[in-house]
Image (cartoon, rainbow, N blue to C red):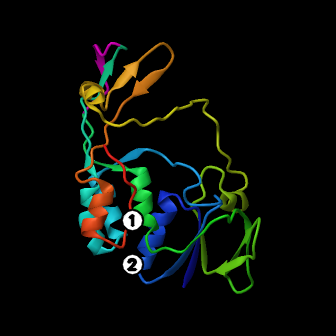
Amino acid sequence: MRVAIAGAGLGGLCLAQGLRQAGIEAEVHERDPAITARFQGYRLVLSQTGLTALRGCLPRRWHALLEAISGDAYGERLVLDPRLNKIGELGPGRSGTVIDRHVLRHLLLTGLTVRTGAALTGYAVLADGRVEARFAHGDPVAADLLVGADGVGSAVRAVLAPRTTPTDTGVRFVIGRTPLTGQFAGLARAFGSKIAGDGVSLLLGAMRFRTPPKRAAEELAPEVVLPDVGD
């Protein structure tokens, strides 16, 4: 069985790793000209169920590495004013595991076949039941199954369900990262909380690695190359 996956984001790559563990051939097609063409996200919080599912898609020998490059989610989940005075509460604290998206993506890329510069334009079902994926550049690819993991503007969805279109909510986010120096560590009360301003709000979260990713990979899984980033 051969599976073609459109999109080399976390979802597509995680699926490819899971299929690989099951002995199924999977090839990922990514429209970006290179894996490092743009920075993709900052961090995510996984529940225990999500973390278990992620582990299940990875080789067992990487489980210790995954543990080392993640951290604990914590926070008081308060509503604060711009001077960090408490003015409300968001509800029960959220526990889980925090993972850096950039680091996780590099882990998930390890050992996979990823074709970059492959913008999917559509697909067609062949007479034998297989599917032919077509691209803006390059030859089409035939597979037993095509998975659309190609985001909000999915070319797969455009063919499969053309009447299903995204709705713009008008909400916008500006996301940034900064090294966790002592100055920022002193804002711990705001981690996991909402700072409410005039028409805008600010959310802060800390990414603390149990072991720096690059060193963790070198020590626990030398075949994996991870970015040299700190907290």
Secondary structure, mark 2, is helix
Residue 157, by quadrant, is bottom right
Q: Mark 2 points at which residue?
A: 21
Using residue 83 as the reference point, say whether residue 189 is left or right of it: left
Residue type, label 1: Val
**Residue 181 horizontal/vertical position (percent):** 29, 33
Q: Can residue 158 be seen in this view?
A: yes
Q: How far apart are marks 2 and 1 (CA)?
A: 20 Å
**Residue 206 horizontal/vertical position (percent):** 31, 37
Q: Quadrant of the N terminus?
A: bottom right
Identified at 43% across, 61% down, the residue is 106
Identified at 39% across, 35% down, the residue is 178
Q: Is residue 179 shown in magenta?
A: no
Position above or below: 78 against 97: above
Using residue 16 as the reference point, say whether residue 45 is left or right of it: left
Identified at 71% across, 57% down, the residue is 158
Residue type, label 2: Gln
Identified at 34% across, 35% down, the residue is 205
Using residue 127 as the reference point, say whether residue 9 is left or right of it: left
Q: Is residue 86 shown in magenta?
A: yes
Q: Which of the two residues, 11 or 166, is positioned nearer the viewer here?
A: 11
Q: Which of the two residues, 179 or 102, is positioned nearer the viewer here?
A: 179
Among numbered discs 2 and 1, the one appearing first in the sequence: 2
Question: Which residue range is magenta in the image?
Answer: 83-92
Residue 125, by quadrant, is bottom right
Q: Mark 1 points at which residue?
A: 225
**Residue 7 horizontal/vertical position (percent):** 58, 61
Using residue 150 as the reference point, say whether residue 58 is left or right of it: left
Mark nearest the camera among 2 and 1 is 1
